[in-house]
Amino acid sequence: MLLKGTIIKGIGGFYYVDTNEGIIECRARGKFRKNEILPTVGDSVTVETTDLKQGSVKEIEKRKNLLVRPAVSNIDTLMIVAAVANPQPDTSLIDKMLVIAAKRGIKGALCINKSDLDSAGDTDKLKECYENAGYKVFITSAEKGEGISELKAELRNKTTAFAGLSGVGKSSILTIITGRELETGDTSRIERGKHTTRHVELIKIEDGYVFDTPGFSQLEVEDIKAGELKDYFPEIEKRDSLCRFRGCSHISEPDCAVKEALKNGEISQSRYDSYVKMYEKLKMIKDWERGGSNGK
């Protein structure tokens, strides 16, 4: 019997595939090793089974994207969780993660948690900043259970990765959404001597999947050329063709539509500052120094 499904977990050469007939424990066909293809969590696959309990991965469909750390494919959305306070939001880090996601063909979105701690209207300011840049923004309070239903509606029929620094309430949000207590990083652990191996797992919620991305915030944007960075800032990219000079860096050139938009308040200062900071860093990296293929 052939069934289509999604790999939700892989441990020790076994792959657990979620199908319409339930979860089937599978081994991978030898041809994948021969072709140097490793089945990955998130892969859409065809499995062959006789008892609906065990089987083998027969085919892997073409991936639309791939992360290496953690190893997951076919992600629809990266949901970046930030706290409005305790800890204060790090917009530079948020912007970096949005760029990394866009580079890998993943749609970025922002969840601003701990809205119950906001006494200065900072939530609305942050929301306006990222909505003006073209991103969906969700306001939540995991402590009070507010905004979770709107967030859950966004997750339907998608595979969503959650990322964010420690202390922002990401685990609390995922616990509410999934109805289960999650380990730190939402990973299975296998102890091998002194080493601990983490394995990411997709968690089924209604018609979609969610998972945590421990370590995503440590990734860098070094595989992007400085001149390409504008393509990953939506509010800059859409004004790029309006600049006087082709190939405008939007930093020092005259008659720059981006700087004009910044002056008029159409682009936020924090977003522009993040762009300049990343651009200057990427400009210093030689082509041969660029990391290769994490996620592509």
Image (cartoon, rainbow, N blue to C red):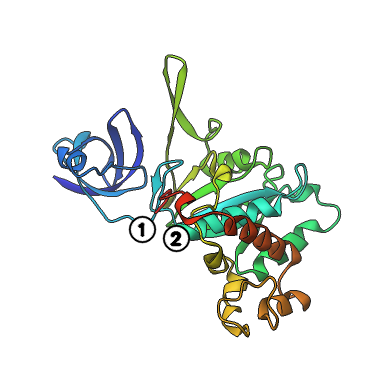
- Left or right relative to 155: residue 13: left
- Indicate whether 73 appears above or below 194: below
Name which of mark 1 and mark 2 comes first in the sequence. Answer: 1
- Indicate whether 163 appears above or below 275: above
Observer able to see residue 150: no
- Left or right relative to 143: residue 223: left
Tag 2 secondary structure: loop
Q: Which quadrant does the N terminus fall into?
A: top left
Quick check: marks 1 and 2 in contact, CB under 8 Å? yes
Q: Nearer the viewer, residue 151 or 91?
A: 91
Percent position of residue 211, x then y: 48, 43
Q: Nearer the viewer, residue 233 or 58?
A: 233
Mark carried by residue 204:
none
- Left or right relative to 74: residue 141: right
Percent position of residue 147, x then y: 65, 54
Tag 1 secondary structure: loop
Mark carried by residue 64:
1
Which amino acid, mark 2? Gly
At 46% from the left edge and 48% from the top edge, which residue is drawn?
A: 291
Classed neighbour count for the residue bearing mark 2: other residues with Cα under 10 Å, few (<14), some (14–19), many (≥20): some
At 60% from the left edge and 38% from the top edge, which residue is drawn?
A: 171
Mark carried by residue 105:
2
Q: Nearer the viewer, residue 187 or 238?
A: 238
Percent position of residue 233, x then y: 59, 66
Percent position of residue 179, x then y: 53, 39
- Indicate whether 3 appears above or below 196: below
